[in-house]
Image (cartoon, grey):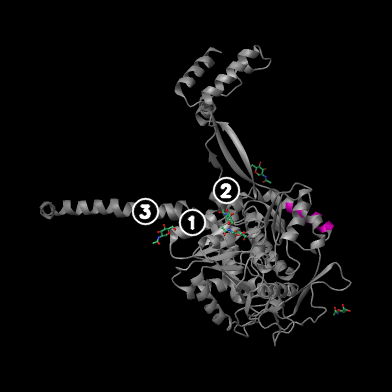
């Protein structure tokens, strides 16, 4: 072969090489780049979408080393004595007062819905270019001001800066940028196959168009005051809706600042800022809002008892809800895990991030026997080094922050006591912690509880706190059984070395989301997020999260060829009013059904013959 090649003259040789190179390398590369970056992300480089620069004043309380006054019990509360229409915000890590806010009155709620509707009527016509520009501006602001945003979220929730950087900022940036890249495609009209009937299928096309709902609402939880608030706002802006967010009464101070930030983005782009509004009230006064006829959709993120109230109240107006509640998420660890140290890091983050106040936090670690022994040893050692406190002003190096309030501490202690009385063993923690520098802060010791079993309350009830529970399973089947045997079904992880096996386990888990050899990555990947069983219903996030905030309007029309030929479909004479011959009409439709749906050729031919006759 080489001899033959050398017999080519130089130019032929080069010509052949360059042609081959062009076909095998250049063409696929250009095609790949075009497909990946230009077609798929058509507008990432659009100059019309360039983010604009924002200047946003930072409140005093959000500055580093702020010396705000501390509240003392009994005034360390969001409620103020004799002031039923005021809510007090304070930092749960230090007890510092952040501000006092008036609850939104019923009249104000009515006005918000009117204003939202006005803004939405304009906005529903907006281009995806402008919608992306809003999100890109917000994304750029967040990237450039991570410190301030983290500090604001930390002051109001007591979490650590690191917890905020991952759980608040990174996930919000992911959501923004995922929608910037894929949102428009998710909302494009979806072409459907049309009728399966042979005859009608020849004539009709079907498609689904996604139109905004109007004014939607989100009731969000306090555990991620930035991310949980922004998630529904970003999705509703992009889908052409207006939104009123009811923030948690625990985090009004930061919620107000975050909503004001978004309103500033809108205003700076000449968009009606009432597209995004904030409402706040005590839970007992939320019914008026959730049963308001002006709302087209409600996203609820919170706890099961409150969900019952919200859904009941929304039902008065038949307002659809997406309900995202807690879980009793498990991690299943098989014996063939290669690196238990690395795995223990994942489990610690999944359990103790935000002091365990995560809807998809790890609540149960279910291990096969060998893995159990290894992990118990590792956790026993690693948890003894955990440091608790506040790093909002970067005074201390800490691992875990405060909890939002101390109102569940007694419940934690009861759950632990119940477990220990039934045979569990408490290795670390188990009680509230009084921090020497922040005696008013709401801290609970990071807790390790082993030998946990299904008949203990802590196996079944959601903890939402910094408690790591270890459960031993005899084999894979019983591990799956244990994982399935709670009333919740939100998220799970499975760890091991044999992917086929892990995949099989993932299929058997009663759960809305499963991560294989990782924790919670379904969330970061912007997959549709939501649970089953008592963890709620409906999905937010990803494509389903966007289309879920739309009317899926079904449109049927004549095929383009018919329209082009000017042929309109009509009622055949045999079945037109007044029916001339009842028997003949019946035979006509009967033949039509055979022609349209029978799969035997001969029957179809006979049916066509009868149709032709009638
Ligand atoms: C603190 O609480 C007490 C008892 O509820 C009340 O009498 C007092 O006025 C409160 N002080 C402040 C500064 O709110
Ligand atoms: C929105 O668009 C429709 C059709 O493109 C148009 O008829 C209507 O006037 C527009 N409405 C506003 C408020 O711009
Ligand atoms: C599954 O768990 C339930 C209760 O948790 C128990 O009654 C049942 O026997 C278990 N089944 C298997 C196959 O382990
Ligand atoms: C992996 O798991 C599958 C299913 O359980 C099993 O059939 C297979 O033999 C396993 N492979 C290895 C290498 O152990
Ligand atoms: C989960 O486990 C339960 C209890 O063993 C079992 O009945 C159920 O079939 C499992 N779920 C799935 C989806 O396999």
Q: Which residue is mark 1?
A: 504
Magenta-drawn stretch, dominant element (helix, strand or loop): helix
Q: How far is the residue under mark 2 from the one under mark 1?
A: 33 Å
SS at badge 3? helix
Quadrant location of residue 310? bottom right
Secondary structure found at label 2: helix
539 relative to 57, above or below: above
111 part of magenta stretch: yes
Q: Which mark is residue 30?
A: 3
> Front-most of 95 and 264?
95
**Mark 3 and mark 1: Cα distance apart in space:** 39 Å
x, y (%) of residue 483? 58, 62
Q: Is residue 364 shown in magenta? A: no
Q: State which image quarter holds ligand 5.
A: bottom right
Rendered location of residue 299, percent (x, y): 69, 55
Placement of the C terminus among the 4 image quadrants = top right
Q: Position of residue 477 (x, y in %)?
A: 52, 60
Q: Indicate which disc, 2 or 1, sits on the residue closer to the N terminus.
A: 2
Mark 1 vs ligand 4: CB below 8 Å: yes
Q: Secondary structure at mark 1?
A: helix
Q: Residues within 10 Å of mark 2 (few under 14, many from 20)?
A: many
On screen, residue 395 above or below 254:
below
Mark 2 lies on residue: 187
The segment highlighted magenta reads: 106-116
């Amino acid at each position: 072969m080489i001899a033959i090649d050398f017999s080519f003259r130089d130019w032929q040789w080069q010509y052949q090489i360059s042609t081959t190179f062009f076909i095998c390398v250049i063409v696929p590369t250009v095609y790949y780049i075009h497909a990946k970056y230009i077609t798929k992300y058509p507008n990432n480089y659009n100059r019309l979408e360039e983010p604009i620069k924002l200047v946003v004043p930072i409140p005093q309380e959000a500055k580093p080393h702020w010396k705000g006054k501390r509240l003392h019990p009994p005034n360390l509360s969001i409620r103020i004595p004799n002031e039923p229409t005021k809510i007090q915000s304070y930092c749960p890590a230090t007890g510092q007062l952040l501000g006092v806010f008036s609850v939104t009155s019923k009249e104000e709620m009515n006005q918000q819905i009117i204003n939202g509707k006005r803004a939405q009527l304009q906005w529903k016509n907006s281009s995806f270019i402008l919608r992306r520009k809003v999100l890109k501006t917000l994304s750029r602001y967040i990237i450039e001001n991570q410190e301030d945003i983290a500090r604001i979220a930390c002051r109001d929730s007591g979490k650590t800066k690191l917890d905020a950087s991952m759980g608040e900022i990174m996930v919000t940036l992911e959501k923004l940028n995922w929608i910037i890249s894929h949102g428009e495609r998710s909302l494009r009209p979806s072409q459907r196959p049309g009728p399966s009937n042979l005859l009608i299928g020849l004539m009709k096309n079907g498609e689904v168009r996604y139109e905004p709902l109007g004014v939607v609402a989100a009731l969000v939880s306090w555990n991620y005051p930035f991310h949980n608030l922004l998630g529904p706002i970003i999705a509703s802006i992009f889908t052409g809706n207006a939104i009123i967010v009811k923030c948690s009464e625990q985090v009004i101070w930061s919620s107000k600042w975050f909503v004001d930030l978004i309103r500033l983005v809108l205003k700076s782009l000449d968009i009606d800022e009432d597209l995004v509004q904030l409402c706040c009230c005590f839970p007992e006064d939320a019914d008026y809002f959730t049963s308001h006829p002006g709302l087209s959709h409600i996203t609820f993120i919170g706890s099961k008892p409150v969900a019952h109230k919200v859904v009941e109240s929304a039902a008065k107006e038949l307002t659809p809800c997406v309900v995202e509640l807690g879980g009793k998420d498990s991690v299943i660890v098989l014996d063939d895990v290669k690196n238990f140290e690395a795995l223990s890091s994942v489990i610690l983050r999944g359990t103790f991030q935000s002091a365990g106040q995560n809807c998809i936090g790890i609540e149960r670690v279910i291990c096969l026997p060998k893995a159990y022994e290894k992990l118990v040893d590792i956790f026993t050692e690693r948890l003894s080094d955990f440091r608790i406190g506040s790093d909002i002003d970067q005074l201390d190096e800490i691992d875990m922050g405060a909890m939002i309030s101390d109102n569940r501490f007694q419940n934690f202690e009861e759950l632990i006591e119940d477990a220990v009385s039934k045979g569990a063993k408490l290795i670390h923690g188990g009680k509230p912690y009084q921090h020497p520098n922040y005696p008013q802060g709401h801290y609970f010791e990071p807790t390790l509880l082993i030998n946990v079993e299904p008949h203990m309350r802590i196996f079944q009830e959601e903890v939402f706190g910094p408690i790591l529970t270890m459960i031993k399973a005899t084999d894979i089947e019983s591990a799956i059984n244990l994982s399935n045997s709670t009333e919740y079904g939100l998220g799970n992880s499975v760890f091991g070395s044999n992917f086929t096996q892990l995949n099989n386990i993932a299929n058997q888990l009663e759960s809305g989301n499963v991560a294989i050899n990782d924790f919670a990555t379904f969330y970061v990947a912007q997959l549709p997020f939501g649970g089953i069983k008592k963890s709620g219903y409906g999905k937010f996030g990803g494509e389903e999260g966007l289309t879920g905030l739309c009317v899926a309007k079904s449109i049927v029309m004549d095929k383009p060829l018919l329209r082009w030929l000017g042929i309109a479909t009509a009622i055949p004479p045999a079945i037109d009013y007044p029916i001339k011959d009842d028997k003949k009409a019946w035979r006509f439709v009967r033949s039509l059904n055979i022609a349209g749906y029978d799969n035997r050729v001969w029957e179809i031919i006979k049916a066509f013959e009868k149709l032709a006759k009638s």
